[in-house]
Structures are given as structure tokens and as C-alpha cells.
Amino acid sequence: MDKEQDEIQFLGFFGILKESCTIVSSWRKIFTQITIFLILPLSFIYLAHIQISKIIFTQIVHNEFMLLNFSKGSKSYNKIDNTLSSEWMTFFLFKIGYLVFFVILSLLSTSAVVYTIACIYTAKETTLNKVLSVVPKVWKRLMITFTWNFVFIFVYNFLCILIFFSIALIPGLDHMGYIGGMAFLLVLSIPYFMGLLYITMIWHLASVVSVLEESYGLNAMRKSRGLIKGKMGISAAVFVVLGLSFFGIQHMFKIFVVYGDGDGIGKRIVYGIICLVLLSISMLFQLIMETIVYFVCKSYHHENIDKSSLADHLGGYLGEYTPLQHKDIQFEEF
């Protein structure tokens, strides 16, 4: 974090990656602690939910198949039907519980990493105890920002579904055939995923804004939307690569652990541990790189940051000062 502000705006993908590696290697202890206490449990919950979901859903599919072998209303049919109802309820409750814990740990990890990087930048002493004491206060701001993102994603998907069905009702589309239909879906999916990526980028940047500035919630989303202008390409590259690495690890876990029954329990445990470590590292670098993207965008728009103002803002989470009012944090040099 020793670059001048005018230089930081020129960082590309590999420059951001190199800066992330430098931060982690220079402050290995604190990031190792954050990874062990927050990111590792987050990664474990995510991978464990994939395995448990597969076990429950496999049993549901088996019982659905068994139900076809009995006459409706028979004793055996009613018994399996009741079992299915119970299994579906278990499945949905498990999914809800997983989502709650995943979102909480995800936001806690985000606040911990962003706060730590800001402390490093301002040369403010930080320890795991300080980070953990700040995290619950920052988490509340992030939760509001996340809620707004959820609303935008819900509305966006709802509108896309309406548009899709409206287009599907156009006369003549039902005669396109299989290949034509697949090509049509591919054409529609491209703008959909581009819009989804755009909303995701704004949300991740808004999460950083929520920690480092006075803005949070809808205001942070507006702020991040303005910051990302002019740096859309590098921001998209960072989030696409990070997303691909995330789904790559997830796919590897499914192949070697979830569906790797022929490899034996020993190999599956080893593969599971490897995936857990890789996913934890990927999540850590995602949080660090999205924070650096924030600094790159600030530099590009010539929004200078004053280290003392940022230090005061960070100290406010610990009750060390009275929070600034009606003023964004400005950086002098990066």
C-alpha cells in the first residue's frame, strides 16, 4: 500500500493481484487469524451444505421413485408420502438455516478484511481482538447494504422473467426447433448475466464503501455506482476471474467429494480439505482485491483520501472519536 494515489489508478488486474499478495505476505499473521476465525468457517459451511444437500435430496428422489410402486391411498403409499413431506420440510429448513449463517459469516468476513486493510493503510495498529470488536458494529451497516442488494436482485430477476415470457409468447418462436431454441436462450442469457455482473460489482464495492465511508445502504450503492464508472473493465475482469475460481473450486468439490463415491472415504476427505483450503484462500483474496478496486476507483476519479480522516473514521468504531458528519472520507495518497 505504498503507491502514490496518481499511480494506483493505473493498476490492472495483475497489478491488483500483486498488491493483494504483497499485503497478505506483509501482514501474514493478522490475515491468517482472520482466515481461521471467520473465512475458514464460512468456506466449511458452504462446502458442507453442498454435501448435506446432496444427501437429503438423493433420499427425496429415492422416495419419490418408491412412491410410484404403490397405489395411492395404500398404507405403504401414505407412509412414504409422510416421509417425503418430512424430508422436504427438512430440506427447506436446512437451506434457510444455511443461508442465514452464510450471509452472517460472509458480512463479518467482509467487514474484518476491509477494516484491517484500512488500518494497514493508515498505519493504525490492529490486532485480532480489535478487529473482532469492530466487526459487529460494521456488520450492521453491511447488512443494510446487503438488504438493498437483495431487493435489486429480486426486482431484476422478476423483470427479466416477465421479459422472457413476453418474448416467448411472440408468434412463431415455438417453431424454431431445439437448436434454434438453445441459440435463442443463449442470446437472452448474455445481457441477463451482464446485468447480474453489474449489480454484483456495485454491491461488492458498496460493501467497501459501507466500511470506509459514512455512506451505507442505498447511499453506498449510489456511491459505488459512481465510483465504478471509468473502471468498468478492470472491475469486471476482477470479479469474473474471482467468480470463475470460486465456481471452479465448487465444481472440483462436487466431482471429487460429493460424487466421488468410488475414491474411498480417505481420498474424499483429502480432496475435501484441499477444496476447503483453496476456497478459503480464494475468498480472502476476493475481499482484499475488491477493497483495492475501491482505492483504484477513488484514485481514478481524483477523490483524494486523507489518512487522518480515515483513521478517525476507523477509530469511531472503537469509540475513539465522534463520527464525522456530512463528509465523505478523502484520501490524499495511496
Image (spheres, helix red, strand yellow):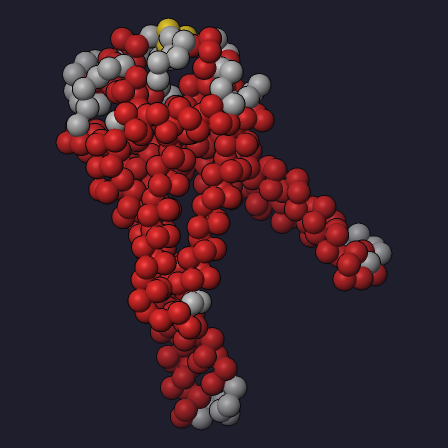
> Residue at the location (47% across, 75% down)?
61
Percent x, y of residue 11 = 49, 19
> Residue at the location (31% across, 55% down)?
273
State which quarter of the image contains the C terminus. Answer: top left
242 horizontally vs 33: left or right: right
State which quarter of the image contains the N terminus. Answer: top left
Residue 297 is at least partly visible in this image:
no
Residue 168 vs residue 303, the one in the foreground: 303
How many dots with numbers? 0
Q: Does 308 appear above or below 87?
A: above
Percent x, y of residue 307 = 30, 10
Residue 190 vs residue 166, the one in the foreground: 190
Residue 324 vs residue 23, the one in the foreground: 23
Percent x, y of residue 128 = 18, 32
Q: Does 322 appear above or below 56?
A: above
> Residue at the location (31% across, 29% down)?
24
Q: Does 121 appear above or below 161?
A: above
Residue 307 is at least partly visible in this image:
yes
> Residue at the location (36% across, 58% down)?
271
Percent x, y of residue 17 = 44, 29
Give residue 285's quadrant in the image. top left
